[in-house]
Image: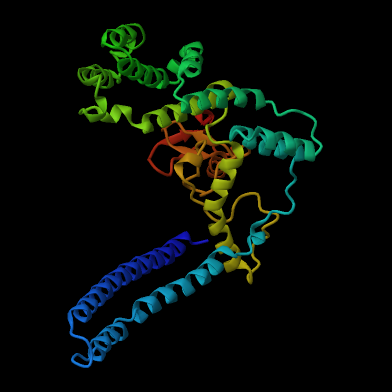
């Protein structure tokens, strides 16, 4: 599924549409001017038969004929005609080729993942209805927590920071261990609210001394300096050099950070749920697998349903790399529980099966490291755990 070709086709349609709009606007303006000019001449001209108005009308008609938009419209129509064909070609792939039909799924776990996703998005009624429809009477374990999280986020959307500040205060130690600046972000927003609401700056200064001064030794020092400088324009921050402090994006960033930390600290989950992560990673891997299946369809060298590892390398984005993977530099095989990585006395790492082969399955007490001239003592090889 090559999305770049779809984007290129879409960009061509957009460019042609903009060109057509511009050209149409120019011609309409010109025709309007010609009509106004002809009308002015006709109003000032003497009545017939002293003046023949037909020549004026002929000139206007000639202007209409010469300024047709056929070329521009034709190019736009061509681009519009090709775009659906590109969509059909790229998006109508038979993805069933990449299915693993012999994989067993725990239906209950899958249903809980779907319900978890719905609750995470705040769609509690839909999540409840889903579980009721499938006959799963067990309540999703994370529902109550997500209700609380969305109550806090909804309050922030209404510019009410009290629930968020209370939650951050009760989880302050955990946030510090996670090196999160959520508390600082929330207190900064509250500081600016006080600065705008109060008659003088003293209330904001007192709030900063109580809640923000403790962050002065951290990476937030520059942020604190900006906050205090903004007090010089406390009545008109919107038109000051610190107007970005009032940007809605600061509230959005704080809400995202709260969501991320809430999921990480209380639920032990990433900010993106299992369903979102699986689907997004699948969209990256699917084009590679489909291409492989199409290329090897006639060869039938690999039984896709029986292989334990992917027969082709699939590169996923960094956010989908949750643990380290070791590939033996000699055998080119990925380490597994049965074939773990082993560090030799020289510091180089090979897979256990490679070491066994090089030592003739233990018949030799030592062997030469393939990367340095060190004699490796088998008894000193140690398994690595990532």
Q: Is residue 182 left or right of residue 57?
A: right
Q: Please report the residue visible at 36 percent of the width from the left and 69 percent of the height from the top.
A: 16
In the image, residue 258 lies at what x, y percent? 48, 25
Q: Please report the residue visible at 74 percent of the width from the left and 52 percent of the height from the top.
A: 102
Q: Is residue 112 left or right of residue 227?
A: right
Q: Is residue 131 left or right of residue 26?
A: right
Depth check: 344 or 333 in front? 333
**Residue 360 visible, this angle:** no
Q: Is residue 243 left or right of residue 13?
A: left
Depth check: 199 or 83 in front? 199
Q: Please report the residue visible at 52 percent of the width from the left and 34 percent of the height from the top.
A: 342
**Residue 208 visible, this angle:** yes
In the image, residue 239 lies at what x, y percent? 22, 30
In the image, residue 263 lies at what x, y percent? 55, 26
**Count of marks placed on residues:** 0
Q: Please report the residue visible at 60 percent of the width from the left and 63 percent of the height from the top.
A: 293
Toward which corner of the image does residue 77 lie, by quadrant? bottom left
Quick check: 91 above or below 213?
A: below
In the image, residue 146 lies at what x, y percent? 60, 26
Toward which corner of the image does residue 184 lie, by quadrant? top left
Depth check: 15 or 337 in front? 15
């Amino acid at each position: 599924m090559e999305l770049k070709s779809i984007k290129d086709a879409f960009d061509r349609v957009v460019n042609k549409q903009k060109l057509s709009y511009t050209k149409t606007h120019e011609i309409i303006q010109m025709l309007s001017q010609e009509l106004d000019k002809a009308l002015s001449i006709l109003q000032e001209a003497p009545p017939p038969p002293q003046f023949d108005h037909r020549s004026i009308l002929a000139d206007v008609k000639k202007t209409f004929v010469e300024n047709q938009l056929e070329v521009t419209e034709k190019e736009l129509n061509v681009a519009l005609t090709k775009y659906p064909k590109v969509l059909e070609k790229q998006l109508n792939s038979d993805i069933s080729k990449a299915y693993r039909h012999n994989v067993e799924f725990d239906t209950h776990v899958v249903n809980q993942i779907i319900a978890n996703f719905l609750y995470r998005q705040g769609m509690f009624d839909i999540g409840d209805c889903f579980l009721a429809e499938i006959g799963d009477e067990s309540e999703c374990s994370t529902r109550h927590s997500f209700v609380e999280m969305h109550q806090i986020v909804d309050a922030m959307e209404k510019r009410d920071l009290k629930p968020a500040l209370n939650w951050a205060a009760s989880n302050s130690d955990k946030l510090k261990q996670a090196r999160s600046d959520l508390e600082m972000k929330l207190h900064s927003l509250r500081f600016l609210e006080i600065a705008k609401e109060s008659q003088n700056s003293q209330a904001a200064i007192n709030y900063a001394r109580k809640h923000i001064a403790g962050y002065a030794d951290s990476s937030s020092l520059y942020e604190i300096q900006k906050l205090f400088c903004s007090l010089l324009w406390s009545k008109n921050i919107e038109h000051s050099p610190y107007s970005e402090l009032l940007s809605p994006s600061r509230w959005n960033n704080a809400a995202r950070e709260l969501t991320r930390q809430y999921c990480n600290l209380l639920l032990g989950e990433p900010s993106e749920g299992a369903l979102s992560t699986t689907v997004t990673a699948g969209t990256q891997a699917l084009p590679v697998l489909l291409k492989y299946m199409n290329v090897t369809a006639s060869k039938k060298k690999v039984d896709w349903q029986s292989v334990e590892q992917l027969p082709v390398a699939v590169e996923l984005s960094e956010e989908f790399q949750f643990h380290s993977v070791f590939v033996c530099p000699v055998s080119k095989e990925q380490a597994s529980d049965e074939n773990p990585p082993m560090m030799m006395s020289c510091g180089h790492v090979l897979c256990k099966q490679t070491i066994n082969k090089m030592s003739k399955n233990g018949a030799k007490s030592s062997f030469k490291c393939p990367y340095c001239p060190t004699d490796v003592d088998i008894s000193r090889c140690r398994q690595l755990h990532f």
